[in-house]
């Protein structure tokens, strides 16, 4: 298992470099950038001094070099005006729109982003797995139909619409504001039990809204997978040997049915980050989603690149976690290559 884990971790390195290169190329595909737009605007106003200053910034951040050199400087493997200073050295670049380092712009948002979306993933599995199993075991019963109705409703409801409905009616009916991560009176207050209660309440609402649509899709897939497993010969043989009930269900069919969902962890985290952008805007959540939208609109190269790379790193981490969990659940995953040799 240790060898298998080491292989997964080593493969992250070339994958990270390839993803970083792809992100850098895609961001540069649209014509112009933030500084070029600023230069054109200042020159149109006759401000030659301001245009010269911004042109100096282009050279200072290596934006006047060929793209391969720009990428090398950004990554930290090519010497720039400040030496070797890039992602590998912890220098994420400068946000031209906010006029400060990228790390300062996203510092407050990275923690809430990871927290909210990790809790959303956990909520999806905690809700969908038992409901999917019950729906498969009680096929064509009233419980099955009720769970199916809930799943279809969840899949059909856009997250931002649910967020708007909850935001409005919680204020109208209960006089409670669920925007942000804490109530306004606790925003700048030191930590206390009351502030923790406010955080827990706001987190619960945000997590449920973000996870809602993912729950419905997983319930339907798990029900179909488990029904397929329950009809296989090994289950019939186990029943013939006297193994019944939850012991039979959990020993093999459920383990086999959840394998695709374990493999999906790598895609689930970044999809939640990207899919929750509008929800974050509606609920005023301090996540990277709204910052990414603003960075893409203004063509803020280094800020947008770092946030996209952050989502890609979540994908890599989620993929490694799913690979390790698959290796524990199904030994064939980690032993397959070794047996072929």
Image (spheres, grey):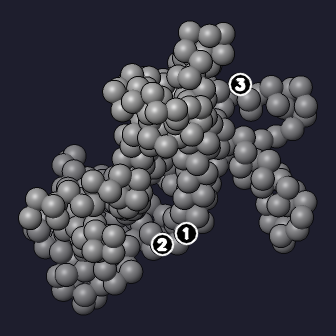
Residue 230 x, y percent position in the rendering: 43, 26
Residue 305 x %, y %? 33, 60
Residue located farthest toward the bottom when viewing the structure as drawn: 83
How busy is the neighbourhood of tag 3: few (under 14 within 10 Å), some, or many (20 plus)? few
Q: Position of residue 299 (x, y in %)?
A: 34, 52
Name the spot of residue 249 as percent of width and height, x first: 52, 35
How far is disc 1 from disc 3 in space, using C-alphas? Answer: 30 Å
| Residue at screen point 82% across, 61% down | 196
Residue at the image point whose x is 27% and y is 74% from the top: 3
CA gap, disc 3 and disc 2: 34 Å
Give 39 or 150, whichever is nearer the viewer: 150
Asked if the residues shown at circle 2 and circle 1 are in contact, with their CB atoms under 8 angstroms apart, the answer is yes
Residue at position x 48%, y 72% in the image:
103
Helix, strand, or loop for circle 2? Answer: helix
Secondary structure beneath dot 1 equals helix
- 310 to the left or right of 148: left
On the question of residue 283 being in view, the answer is: no
Q: Which residue is mark 1?
A: 107
Instruction: Name the foreground residue: 271 vs 63.
Output: 271
* Circle 3 residue: 165
């Amino acid at each position: 298992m240790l060898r298998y884990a080491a292989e997964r971790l080593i493969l992250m390195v070339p994958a990270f470099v390839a993803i970083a290169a792809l992100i850098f190329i895609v961001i540069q595909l649209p014509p112009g950038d933030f500084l070029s737009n600023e230069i054109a605007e200042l020159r149109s106003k006759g401000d030659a001094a301001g245009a010269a200053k911004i042109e100096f910034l282009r050279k200072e951040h290596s934006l006047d070099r060929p793209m391969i050199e720009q990428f090398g400087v950004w990554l930290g493997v090519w010497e720039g005006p400040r030496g070797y200073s890039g992602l590998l050295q912890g220098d994420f670049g400068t946000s031209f729109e906010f006029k400060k380092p990228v790390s300062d712009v996203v510092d407050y948002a990275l923690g809430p982003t990871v927290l909210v979306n990790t809790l959303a993933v956990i909520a999806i599995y905690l809700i969908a797995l038992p409901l999917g199993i019950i729906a498969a075991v009680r096929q064509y019963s009233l419980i099955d139909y009720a769970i199916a109705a809930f799943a279809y409703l969840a899949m059909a409801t856009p997250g931002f619409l649910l967020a708007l409905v909850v935001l409005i009616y919680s204020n109208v009916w209960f006089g409670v504001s669920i925007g942000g991560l804490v109530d306004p009176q606790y925003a700048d207050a030191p930590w206390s039990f009351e502030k923790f209660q406010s955080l827990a309440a706001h987190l619960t609402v945000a997590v449920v809204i973000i996870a809602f649509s993912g729950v419905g899709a997983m319930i339907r897939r798990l029900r179909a997978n488990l029904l397929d497993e329950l009809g296989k010969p090994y289950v019939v043989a186990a029943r013939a040997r006297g193994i019944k009930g939850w012991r039979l269900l959990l020993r093999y069919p459920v383990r086999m049915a959840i394998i695709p969902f374990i493999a999906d962890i790598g895609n689930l985290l970044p999809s939640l980050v990207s899919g929750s952008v509008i929800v974050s805007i509606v609920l005023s959540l301090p996540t990277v989603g709204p910052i990414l939208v603003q960075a893409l609109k203004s063509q803020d190269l280094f800020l947008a690149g770092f946030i996209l790379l952050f989502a890609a790193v979540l994908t890599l981490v989620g993929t490694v976690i799913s690979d390790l969990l698959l290796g524990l659940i199904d030994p064939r995953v980690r032993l397959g290559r070794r047996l072929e040799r």
